[in-house]
Amino acid sequence: MKPDFELTTSRLLFRPYKSADLHALFDAVKTSIPQLSPWLSWCTESYDHDDAYAWINASRNNWQNDISYELAIFDRQSLQFIGAISLNNLSEQLNCAELGYWIKTDSQRQGFATEACKAIAKFAFSTLGLTRLEIVVHTGNLASQRTALACRAQFECTARNKIYTSGCAYNGLVFSLIPSDL
């Protein structure tokens, strides 16, 4: 996929990460640790500029090699960084992917995650030709559960040991989106 890709909605701009996003990504993560760290194992007090730099480089490589699609999310008017969304764990055999997202704390509860999920789902179905997306959520992450339902994703099950992070397995709630859900 081309690195100059952009996707927009009425309020949001999505694009692959650039080196220029380093400080905005770092600041967003650092100010959101209390809200994000229970669900994102990499979001810790020790997160530093080197971690942000490594993530930007890895995500650009993944994007260019069609391994996964991580997009930075910006407010379309102010161009302020507000979070990230990704399609990962792509499966050619099953023609599906997992959809993940996070929004920095001071941009939460404004519908950005729902708007972003709907936009990336349309991209996944129309541009990539996928036929299924899964949203896997920690059982205690009520905000992400509400986002999945607001996107019209269907709750399918509580999958045992679905989430593996930091050497531990956790149950995950599995939601799915198919093209007819949009």
Image (tube, rainbow, N blue to C red):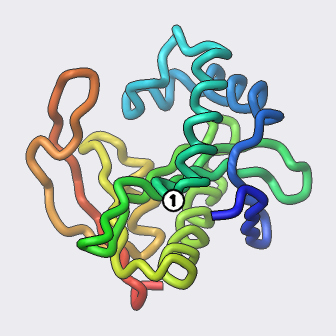
Q: Is residue 58 above or below residue 63?
A: above
Q: Please provide percent x and percent y for residue 148.
A: 41, 63
Q: Is residue 130 left or right of residue 53?
A: left
Q: Is residue 115 left or right of residue 134?
A: right
Outermost left residue: 160
**Residue marked by disc 1:** 66
Q: Please provide percent x and percent y for residue 95.
A: 32, 75
Q: Residue at x 48, y 85 (%)?
A: 182
Callout 1 secondary element? loop
Q: Is residue 121 above or below residue 64?
A: below
Q: Please provide percent x and percent y for residue 57.
A: 63, 34
Q: Residue at x 80, y 53 (%)?
A: 75
Q: Is residue 42 above or below residue 94?
A: above
Q: Is residue 47 left or right of residue 177?
A: right
Q: Please provide percent x and percent y for residue 111.
A: 62, 60
Give the quarter of the image for residue 3. Answer: bottom right
Q: Amino acid at mark 1?
A: Asp
